[in-house]
Image (cartoon, rainbow, N blue to C red):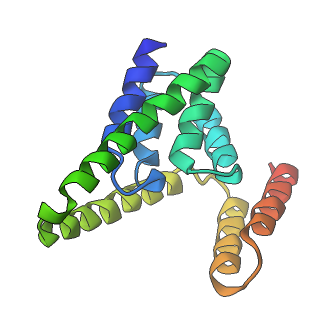
Amino acid sequence: MLRVFLEFVKIGFIAFGGGWSIIGIIKDAVLSNNWLTPEQFKEILSISQMTPGPVMLNTATYVGLKMYGITGAILNSIAVLIAPITFTTLFFIVRDRLPKEFITALKFGVIFLISLTFISLLTNISSFYQILISIVAFLLFTKTKIDPIYVIFISGIIGFFLF
């Protein structure tokens, strides 16, 4: 349990830009250590997206819950929150002394990490229907005013019956 906790502390410290920029790193850590199967990780990621809150925190919590029950969920939640609390505190102390170029560099790093996550998630698509559901959901999110919860709920129902 300590090894999983420390891994999520480390992940929390490299999670610049929020949860979506770091999901690929969480996936690599969880799968390379054989803590979960790829199918279990996909399930956890799906649940993490549907529940309220940051996706990185939700994913870490569900990984802890799946592996060690409620104790693991609490410890993983704390693990990924240690770094943001530390960085936020330090940032507010030194924010006026940081050069603007530093902030710009962080933005490019975040874009790169989100792109890597997107590409790694694309490699898990295994059927035409998954591609179709993804495209339709994306279009509904971006081109309509339909509440995203309905799109997620309907996609989940369709996925349940197709897969």
Q: Position of residue 58 (x, y in %)?
A: 59, 42
Q: Nearer the viewer, residue 47 or 97?
A: 97
Residue 95 is at least partly visible in this image = yes
Q: In x, y percent, where is residue 94?
A: 18, 55
- Left or right of 24 in this view: 35: right
x and y percentages locating residue 128 in the rendered image:
68, 63
Q: How many marks?
A: 0
Left or right for 13, reference 27: left
Q: Nearer the viewer, residue 106 or 92?
A: 92
Q: Is residue 26 above or below residue 105?
A: above
Q: Nearer the viewer, residue 155 or 75?
A: 75
Identify the residue at horizontal 66%, vertical 76% (top origin).
141
Seen in the picture, residue 153 relative to 43 is either above or below; the reply is below
Q: Residue at x 21, y 66 (%)?
A: 103
| x, y percent for residue 87 | 30, 46
- Whether residue 89 sits left or right of residue 38 in the image: it is left
Q: Is residue 144 above or below residue 110?
A: below
The answer, for residue 37, to whether it is visible in the render is no
Image point 70% across, 49% down: which residue?
51
**Quarter of the rendering containing residue 134:** bottom right
Q: State the residue at coordinates (63%, 36%).
A: 39
Q: Is residue 66 above or below residue 94?
A: above
